Amino acid sequence: MADKRPLPWWSGPRAIVQHLLMLDDTPHAIALGTSIGVFIGMTPTIGVQMLLVLLVSLMTGRLFYFSLPAALIAVYISNPITALPIYWLGYQVGRVFLDGDLKRETLASSLEFDGLRQFWDSLHTLFVDIGGPLVLGSVIVGAASAAIAYPLVWQLLRRCQRASALHDSLASSRQELTAHLH
């Protein structure tokens, strides 16, 4: 049975994986949802990532199905603690293709904001002022991360399902043996 407690953004990787494993859906749907969430989580859209997942779900609902809860859990890959390293990696990858001379401190300061107005200013800075290298690099890093996440999550879910089925089978056999002996 799935854990109904909310998953806080500061959850560690173990808690995130446990929540993914307890989702009631197919391995494909959970792995695809995780991949979509990881991709969006790697983009410089902190603060609106969950909204983006919902929009993707609405826009693709007739084309294909993915686990919305898995995607929402996976966007937690970027949070106030991990955003700077993730965005810096994206920026550095983008610099391979586009010119840029951004300092890490400048990127860090663009991620600090108080209130809605500064939040929108921050998004403007990330997409327009820093722009090209960050966006291109983030898309590349996001796509690579999503491509890795799908088979990893799918395999993990299949192994857990097999282990659960084996456990259930052994428990059933044990009950039958106990009933037969009494």
Image: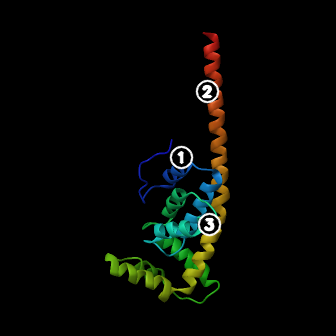
Q: Is residue 13 above or below residue 165?
A: below
The residue that mark 1 highlights is 22
How far apart are the two marked residues, 1 and 3, measured between alpha carbons? 22 Å
Q: Nearer the viewer, mark 1 or mark 3?
A: 1
The residue that mark 2 highlights is 171
Q: Earlier in the sequence, mark 1 or mark 2?
A: 1
What residue sits 61% from the left and 78% below the top? Answer: 93
Quarter of the image where the C terminus is located: top right
Name the kind of residue labelled 2 in the image.
Answer: Ala
Name the kind of residue labelled 1 in the image.
Answer: Met
Which residue is most to the left? Answer: 115
Q: Quadrant of residue 166?
A: top right
The residue that mark 3 highlights is 145
Q: Earlier in the sequence, mark 3 or mark 2?
A: 3
How far apart are the two marked residues, 1 and 2, measured between alpha carbons? 20 Å
What residue sits 35% from the left and 81% below the top? Answer: 118
What residue sits 62% from the left and 38% below the top? Answer: 164
- SS type, badge 1: loop
